[in-house]
Amino acid sequence: MIGSIFILAGCQDTTDEVSVRSEGVGFASERKYSVSDTEVKTLLENPINALKREGIVPEKISIPAIGVEAETLHLGTKENGEMDVPDTIDDVSWFEPGYKPGENGRAVIAGHVDGIKGPAIFWDLAKLEAGDEIIVKGEGNDLVFRVYAMESVELELADVHSVFGYRSSPELILITCSGDYDYNRGTREERLIVYTELVEE
Amino acid sequence: MVSLKKIFVSMSVAFALVFSLFAAGVMADSHTAKLRVVHASPDAPAVDVYVNGDLTLEEVPFKADSGYLDVPAGTHNVEVFAAGTEYAEGEGVLQADLTVEAGKAYTVAAANTLDSLEFVVAEDSMEVSEGKAKIRVGHLSPDAPAVEVGIIGGDALFSGAEFPGITDYAEVDAGTYDLEIRLPDGTQVLPLEGTELAAGTVYSVFAVNTVDSLEVLALIDYEMAASPDGMPTTGLGTPEQNQTNWLLMIGAMAAVLAGGGVVLKKRFQN
């Protein structure tokens, strides 16, 4: 009994694992963009009609580098305007009113870093490195995205409309919580944002 | 006189290396603008583009566009060199100080022939009404006369487009249109039949190349989708709960070790 009280007291200084894992993370790598180059050769196609890219409705994602395999729920916004998240720690959610994976623009998938009892699906997200692959499955297709950048951003600095915004090429953004726990707000101070781009066949 | 031209289109892909302008700083912050570079000079070679002295786009060929790049708001020194040329400040074939505002998007086209190369800059729209499409045209063919763009056998959507210029946007109902580029007297220059203008989409259609090989370079400026107002709350735990769990784990391990110790002791005693 005395022993266990001693252990409790000793653990008051225990570091916050989530915070430690996201401390100092972040990188951005050089990217090779495909530059569209319209050649005039056949009579058949209208160049304006060739511009649109169809995305897929995601059903599952897998991230082999960190052993993630998850069902992808389709959620929108909560009453307070925030992106909604799963009630479960094993699933991830795609922001359904936004861009689809494979469309031009940033499709966003979020997952919890931890649950009440310990690690959740995106516990290891901060370990991703440039070039790691994310496979999105849906509608009988597999789309492969490749990590090009990561940052842990304070909530005040994160421009939500940019993170969920339009791009000239298909991107997939992964989000989880990071940084120190803010007891006043009941959430962590930062968000880990992983930027990935579609790997063209 | 411009003769009737047929549209011949196929897509090929060239690669240009794009270097990030954000070596440091927050990518997701709100102090950035979007900038897109278009090579629209018919006789110029592929080019390298330097922003503030840093190589940013490499080997951009004629008729290629960079897609939107994020750049910090402010004024940037943009210089264009023939691909592979060694950089020397102020020695480029084209230079401009471009001022961009946060939250806005821009197209910067390198236009005209190589000996009179010039930038044509336009602000791009990133909004469109529900169920509508937006379109504008750019006249970037150095030797082509003024043209209009309109419905075949019908009204003009844009008239009096002259080199070098990019028109304002027209917002139209989404749908399929039989468009054409024509001279003010009605002579067709380029047919654009069956043009599908999708809801929630903003288009730029640039006429490029010389008048005897006039072509269309079509780009999408924006596609509408919703955004939430706040980032997700993606942690259900608190540090205490994690610590409690570590405690439980440590406790359990201690118990196992203690138990194991007892067993070992017993074994040794036996």
Image (cartoon, coloured by chain):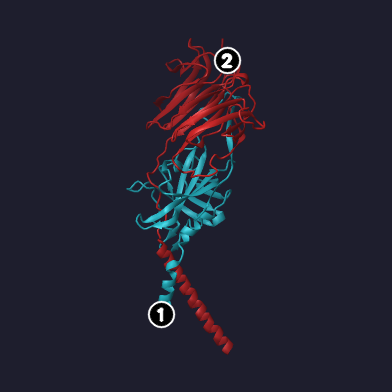
Chain colours: A cyan, B red
Above or below, comparing residue B44 to residue B255 in the picture? above
Pinpoint residue B173: horizontal percent, then vertical percent.
39, 26
Q: CA distance from mark 1 to mark 2?
A: 92 Å
- The kind of residue tagged 2 is Asp
The chain identifier of the residue carrying mark 1 reads: A
Residue name at image x 53 percent, y 18 percent = B190
Q: Secondary structure at mark 1?
A: helix
The chain identifier of the residue carrying mark 2 reads: B
Question: Between B55 and B152, which is closer to the camera in this rendering?
Answer: B55
Res A159 visible: yes
Q: Which residue is mark 1?
A: A2
Q: Residues within 10 Å of mark 2 (few under 14, many from 20)?
A: some
Question: Between B30 and B174, which is closer to the camera in this rendering?
Answer: B30
Pinpoint residue A103: horizontal percent, then vertical percent.
49, 39
Pinpoint residue B151: horizontal percent, then vertical percent.
45, 18
- Report the quarter where the C terminus of chain B lies: bottom right
Q: What mark, if any, has residue A10 been given in the picture?
A: none
- Residue A177, quarter of the rendered image: bottom left
Above or below, comparing residue B250 to residue B162 in the picture? below
Q: Which residue is mark 2?
A: B143
Question: Between B69 and A23, which is closer to the camera in this rendering?
Answer: A23
Q: Secondary structure at mark 2?
A: loop
Pinpoint residue A184: horizontal percent, then vertical percent.
34, 56
